[in-house]
Amino acid sequence: MRNSPAASKAKSSLLPTLARRKYSAAVVGLGYWGPNLARNLSASDDFDLTALVDIDERRRDKVGSLYPAAGRFSSLAEALKDRPIDLVCVATPVSSHASLAEIALNAGANVLVEKPLAKTTAEARALLELSVKVKRKVFVDHTFLYTGAVRELKRHLDSGALGKLLYIDSVRINLGLFQPDVDVVWDLAPHDLAILHHLMGRGPKSVRTMGSCHTPKAGTDAAMADVAYLHLDYGDDVTAHLHLSWLSPVKVRRMIVAGEKQSIIYDDLEPAEKIKIYDHGVSFQIPDDDEARRRLLVSYRKGDMRAPNISLAEAISTELADIASELRGGPTAVASGADGFAIVRVLEAASRSASAGGSKIEVEEA
Ligand SMILES: NC(=O)c1ccc[n+]([C@@H]2O[C@H](COP(=O)([O-])OP(=O)(O)OC[C@H]3O[C@@H](n4cnc5c(N)ncnc54)[C@H](O)[C@@H]3O)[C@@H](O)[C@H]2O)c1
């Protein structure tokens, strides 16, 4: 039997309401980054911020006072007791990511884990396996992938306008913040590695890391570096170089994405013109005759520079909408657990290289 037009109309007007039920969400870890997640969850059309968790009572109270409707808890297990939570956001130090995410998954919640997903590939793999077993999702907060700048970079690269990708060079340096349980590579490189993985659709084949440590606590162990240089080989003649530091007097967030036809400079500290596309390039000619062949003929092309208009919407809010869409049965979110795992693999290889004085370490296929 066919529905009457009136019945169809009533049904279709109900559908968006049903489809857009709000998911309950908790934030664990209310230090520097967690409050950003709490603020975006509380402003979201997709989530209700229902629980705030921190072992530190002062942080609980400080953030809790901004969101009086959310319960305050000193442990995740307590927050999950007797109340269903759809999404647990883990924003604690890296060494506790895997154990907290495991508690959340076992309680039937999905998880959004801060970068990096875990401290080892074994932990990251176990989390993904558990998520399959309990039929819940793991997301990783690779925040930059949701910025207007990185979205524009990706769009431009995919359009082919850059020509063949040649190399990527990134500088991510500032004074601190020193982390208690990871070095500068595990703290800052996840941003660049996630951006590169997103742009190229693949991870590096190998990595070399030169790291140095200047803090008395960690001695001179290069594995606890506060300054590091990563050289990554992505195959197909594409290399990337990352300069990471907690010991720079000034903050720099600048990436060069160089192509045969065009190059892009992405400066995240620019207020509006974060992406600048340079219509510059170099072409090489090898002359036919033997005499001239010794001289490589280089011609330089210098065209215009343009700064496209990019969205300045806050990345976390776009990310939460993407996650909610996947929870509702939509496509896999950009912040996928699988990519989080791939990044941890590279970080582990980078640390092995640093410990081996910069030796080339192959990154196995994730
Ligand atoms: N996505 C980003 O751009 C971005 C930026 C900064 C930090 N981060 C990530 O966020 C995470 C936290 O970094 P931060 O700088 O906010 O650290 P932080 O030290 O400022 O805060 C961590 C908080 O977690 C709490 N905590 C620790 N163990 C806990 C536990 N078992 N249960 C409940 N609470 C616990 C601490 O009391 C503290 O309040 C790290 O993984 C970091 O890599 C991500």
Image (cartoon, rainbow, N blue to C red):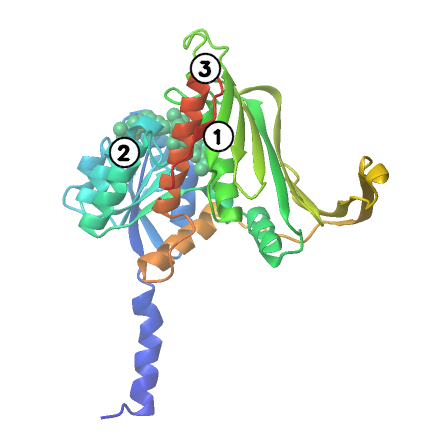
Q: Residue furthest left?
A: 82
Query: Which amino acid, mark 1?
Result: Val
Q: Are marks 3 and 1 in contact (CB under 8 Å)?
A: no
Q: Amino acid at mark 3?
A: Ala
Q: Amino acid at mark 2?
A: Glu
Q: Which residue does the numbered mark 1 point to in the structure image?
A: 207
Q: Is residue 228 above or below residue 117?
A: above
Quadrant in the picture for residue 298: top right
Q: In what element is the residue under mark 3? A: helix
Find disc 3 in the rendering and name its residue: 222
> Which tag is nearer the camera, tag 3 or tag 1?
1
- Could you tell me which residue is drawn at 24 percent across and 38 percent down? 126
- Residue 273 shows in this picture: no
Looking at the image, which is closer to me, 286 or 82? 286
Across and down, in percent, residue 107 comes to: 17, 44
Q: Looking at the picture, tell me which residue is in the foreground, 34 or 122.
A: 122
Question: Which tag, 1 or 2, sits closer to the chain's start?
Answer: 2
Q: Residue at x 66, y 39 (%)?
A: 270
64 left or right of 81? right
Q: Quadrant of the N terminus?
A: bottom left
Q: Would residue 139 be found to the left or right of residue 227 on screen?
A: left
Between label 1 and label 2, give the one nearer the viewer.
Answer: 1
Question: Residue 243 appears at what percent x and percent y?
Answer: 57, 27
Identify the residue under disc 2: 123
* Number of residue marks: 3
Residue 180: x and y, percent? Answer: 38, 19
Tell me the element at label 2. Answer: helix
In this image, 256 relative to 220: left or right? right
